[in-house]
Amino acid sequence: MNKIFKNPIILALDFNSLTKAQSIVSDLRNHIGGVKLGMEFFNSFGPDGVKEISKYGIPIFLDLKLHDIPVTVYKTVRKLMELDIAIINVHSSGGREMLEAAAKARGEFNDKSTKLIAVTVLTSLDNKDIKEIGFNDNSEDLVLRLASLAKDSGLDGVVCSAKEISLIKNKFGKNFILVVPGIRLEEDNKNDQKRVMSPKKAIDAGADLLVIGRPITDSKDPKKAIDNILKNIKQ
């Protein structure tokens, strides 16, 4: 499979219906850069479901946010590397040893095109939520600290909010991959995301890939919605 994203849109397929996911990928694969398969999809269909989506020849971001003891994450990443995946992610708050175990597992395969990235702070969290969890940092400082840990541990990039894009790019450079969820057109409902941004502003700030779900999948005309997003980026 070609693991190069032909445009920055990663379509989130967070469904528990394989038939629906296949139908959407079949219809939109020539319009999007890749697809994201999350925990709901993976828990429903497992590796076989990922293989079914791989048949459409589109890059896959497997969004499982692995967060466990180092040996478990190591073994899991090794197993996931047997699938045809463009991006695998872990959770940076698992700590340096866990991140290094994930990087070691990925490094034991000859296929270096699979990228390993870390989630920093979920886009559903704001500063109030972060304080409640027990962190003293605000969201930007915490994201930078976790991004630094991921880079030092041998990972290729992070998942972050659009609000932290420029901060991370300025500190870690253009080769550190930024995958950004919480992308909405101005007229869209924010749903359960709190730290959001428009596609153009995110790309202009330095985002590499944009994870977009409901603004496309809930649209009456998904292809038109994608075209509007790409036009927004190019303005």
Image: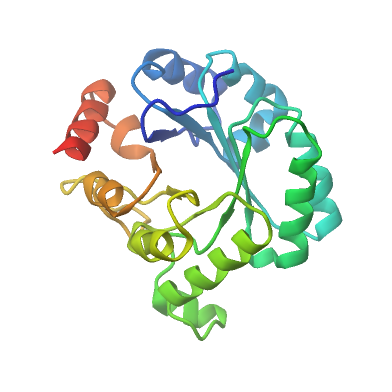
Residue 36: in sight, yes or no? yes
Compared to residue 52, the image places residue 182 above or below, namely below
Instruction: Please tell me whether residue 214 is drawn above or below residue 117 in the rendered image.
Output: above
Percent coordinates x, y for residue 172 in the rendering: 48, 61
Q: Is residue 124 visible?
A: no
**Can you give x and y, in whole percent of width and height, for residue 76 in the image?**
79, 43
Q: Horizontal and vertical percent for residue 150?
A: 61, 61
Quarter-of-image position of residue 31: top left
Q: How is the image coloured?
A: rainbow
Residue at the spot 27% in from the left edge and 54% down from the top edge? 197
Name the quarter where the C terminus is drawn. Answer: top left
Quadrant occupied by the N terminus: top right
Q: Give the x, y percent position of residue 66.
A: 68, 52
- Residue pictured at 34% horizontal, 51% vertical: 206
Is residue 48 rendered to the left or right of residue 218?
A: right
Image vertical order of residue 91 relative to residue 52, above or below: below
Q: Nearer the viewer, residue 152 or 33?
A: 152
Residue drawn at point x = 38 percent, y = 38 percent: 213
Q: Which one is nearer the viewer's eye here, 175 or 128? A: 175
Horizontally, is 54 left or right of 32 in the view?
A: right
